[in-house]
């Protein structure tokens, strides 16, 4: 692996974004832990759900490494992710959980790996750091369910149909209209969707890997277990950073 040059991280978005190859039946998914440590029981329950989706889960023993609250040292986690991208027998990648730690991998990852070997990377929460990095490399990313807390608890804990439609086709996903969706201000907007977990987006500011969405995009924000004042605080920080005036705010949810 070689370190990604800091200047390259802020080179701007590359359009049009490239969607990785679709996952076919029996696709092999590398299960990686870029962030926090996880429960072993939940891990194996999640693997069973991956099999129920028609995919094959693949992992190596490094996924069980521990370094305090993290799933191993940064170099170990970065190496596992790099192997998944480089291995031609791996079709896609899914994270075990979020928490914290993905941002530690960014200086250690070679940006040429996902460029040469574009693959579906599914995750959310702390995985936002990797999604922003991949987006700046010109790739479509997949904000979707991870092992612990979602797949490990069965089909009722995630939108199985949306996940399969997103990952098993190269066509645009189309309309998403979950029952829990609430419109705050009615209207219509169009544009590519950029965003992720507000905590990670805000924390990236002032770094070589800062979230800097392109003009005219639809801004997607999500977070959980945060106090209500954290949402306007994060959005205000983004405004000060001169990004929010250039985007269309679609939804900001706090669970």
Image: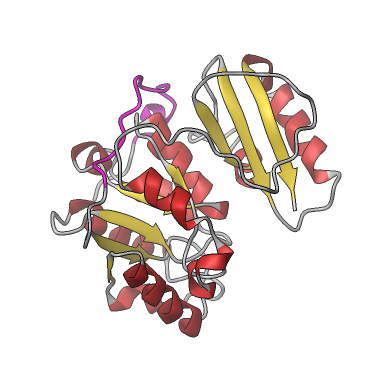
Where's residue 143, x and y in %? 49, 46
Residue in the picture at 36% in, 70% down: 52
Judge by depth and name the residue closer to the eye, 126 or 42: 42
Q: Nearer the viewer, residue 85 or 176?
A: 176
The foreground one among 107 and 119 is: 119
| Outermost left residue | 88
Total marks shown come to: 0
Q: Main secondary structure of the magenta part?
A: loop
**Per the image, is 126 magenta?**
no
Q: Locate residue 192, reporting x and y percent.
A: 49, 24
Q: Is residue 163 above or below residue 26?
A: above
Residue occupying image coordinates x 24% and y 42%: 21
Magenta region, residue range: 5-22
Where does residue 134 sit, x and y in percent of width and height? Answer: 38, 38
Percent across and percent down for residue 80 are: 30, 63
Image-quadrant location for residue 224: bottom right
| Residue 99 occupies quadrant | bottom right
Q: Residue at x 39, y 44 (%)?
A: 166
Q: Is residue 173 visible?
A: yes
Who is closer to the viewer here, 43 or 109?
A: 43
């Amino acid at each position: 692996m070689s370190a990604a040059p800091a200047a390259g991280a802020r080179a701007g978005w590359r359009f049009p974004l490239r969607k990785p190859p679709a996952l076919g039946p029996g696709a092999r998914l590398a299960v990686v832990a870029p962030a926090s440590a996880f429960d072993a029981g939940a891990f194996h329950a999640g693997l069973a759900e991956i099999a129920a989706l028609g995919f094959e889960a693949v992992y190596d023993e490094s996924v069980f490494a521990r370094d305090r609250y993290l799933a191993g040292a940064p170099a170990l986690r970065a190496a596992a992710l790099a192997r998944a991208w480089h291995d031609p027998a791996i079709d896609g990648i899914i994270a075990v959980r979020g928490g914290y730690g993905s941002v530690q991998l960014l200086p250690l990852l070679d940006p040429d790996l996902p460029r040469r070997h574009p693959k579906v990377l599914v995750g959310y929460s702390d995985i936002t750091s990797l999604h922003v990095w991949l987006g700046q490399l010109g790739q479509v990313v997949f904000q979707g369910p991870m092992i612990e807390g979602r797949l490990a608890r069965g089909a009722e804990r995630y939108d199985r149909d949306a996940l399969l439609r997103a990952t098993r086709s190269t066509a645009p996903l189309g309309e998403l209209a979950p029952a829990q969706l609430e419109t705050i201000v009615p209207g219509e907007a169009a544009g590519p969707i950029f965003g992720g977990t507000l905590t990670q987006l805000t924390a990236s500011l002032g770094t070589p890997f800062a979230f800097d969405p392109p003009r005219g995009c639809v801004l997607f924000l999500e977070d959980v277990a945060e106090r209500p004042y954290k949402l306007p605080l994060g959005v205000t920080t983004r405004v000060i950073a001169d990004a929010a005036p250039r985007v269309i705010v679609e939804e900001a949810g706090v669970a």
